[in-house]
Amino acid sequence: MTTVLLSEDDAAGGPGSDVELGPLLLRQGLGDARDILRVYSPAPTAAFSRRDTLRPGYERAASAVRHLGFDPVVRPQGGSLAAYHRGSVVVDHVHRAEQKSLDPVERFQRFAGLHAEMLIGLGVDARIGPVPGEYCPGEYSINAGGMKIVGSAQRVTRDGWLFSTVIQVSGTTQLRDVHTAAYRELGYDFDPATVGSLEDVVPGLTVERVTEAVRAAYDLPGPAVSSRPGASLRSHGPTARPPD
């Protein structure tokens, strides 16, 4: 079995393609790869959950984010809206395995630990746990300076699991505006002051630097490959084993 890091051209299809590719790879796989990772900075995206679409204000929320330049999409995993953009780093990790793997809670714990340790290495006072009033609240969010800076969600199927993480690196004002507009229409409790990014707590951190840190945390030094038809599939060789 191999571990594969997908190239940036696999994030070129826009927000709709971004949220579809992870579940597709979970279902169909890619060659003999057991672990497939995408690390990318997306176009402005407002990723609603299926639960959000049942709220009376969903259509108004979708219109509000569109007005602010974010494409509304519906993702299969996650509890409520999370927005991200070119100042974010998204990690989609697909693990294909039919056998029973970690309990979902334990998986949240392990990935939170991995990402918090990575951020501490970048000089961030990263702490695991939610802050009151945060968007898409989760027990294993990561915060710094009273602001949510990392969120995660997962989907488990008979084929394995998809674990998605969003690291907010820069662009706090834009993120705060879009979350405020959408959560107002959805009717969720939300404190705009909890929206933040790494740049707020460690000035000078860039998407490129964080992307490098993510690749190092997963021990993925090799060249990326494409999932597009006709692309060759190459192994990156032995890697540090991520959580099952």
Image (tube, rainbow, N blue to C red):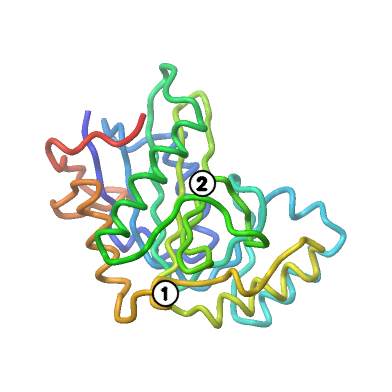
**Mark 1 neighbour density, 10 Å: few (under 14) some (14–19) many (20 or more):** many
> Measured along the vertical axis of the image, is residue 68 above or below residue 222?
below
* Left or right, residue 120 beside residue 196: left
Q: Residue furthest top?
A: 99
* Left or right, residue 138 beside residue 191: left
Which SS class for mark 2? loop
Which SS class for mark 1? loop
Identity of the amino acid at label 1?
Gly
Instruction: Find residue 140 and name its label.
Output: 2
Task: Residue at 82%, 63% (x, y): give it.
Answer: 187
Task: Residue at 52%, 63% (x, y): give it.
Answer: 148
Identity of the amino acid at label 2?
Tyr
Residue 190 or residue 17, whichever sits in front: 190
Report the Cα–Cα distance between label 2 and label 1.
22 Å
Image coordinates for residue 97, horizontal then vertical, percent: 38, 24
Q: Quadrant of residue 16?
A: bottom right
Do residues under tags 2 and 1 come within 8 Å of each other at their CB atoms? no
On the image, numbered disc 1 is attached to which residue? 87
Image coordinates for residue 240, horizontal then vertical, percent: 20, 38
Q: Quadrant of the C terminus?
A: top left
Residue 73 or residue 123, whichever sits in front: 123
Which is more N-terminal, label 1 or label 2? 1
Image coordinates for residue 189, horizontal then vertical, percent: 76, 62
Task: Residue at 70%, 48% (x, y): give it.
Answer: 50
Task: Residue at 65%, 59% (x, y): give it.
Answer: 132
* Left or right, residue 140 beside residue 242: right
> Measured along the vertical axis of the image, is residue 146 above or below residue 237?
below
- The mark closer to the camera, 2 or 1, is 2
Q: Quadrant of residue 242?
A: top left
Residue 176 or residue 67, whichever sits in front: 176
> Measured along the vertical axis of the image, is residue 187 above or below residue 226?
below
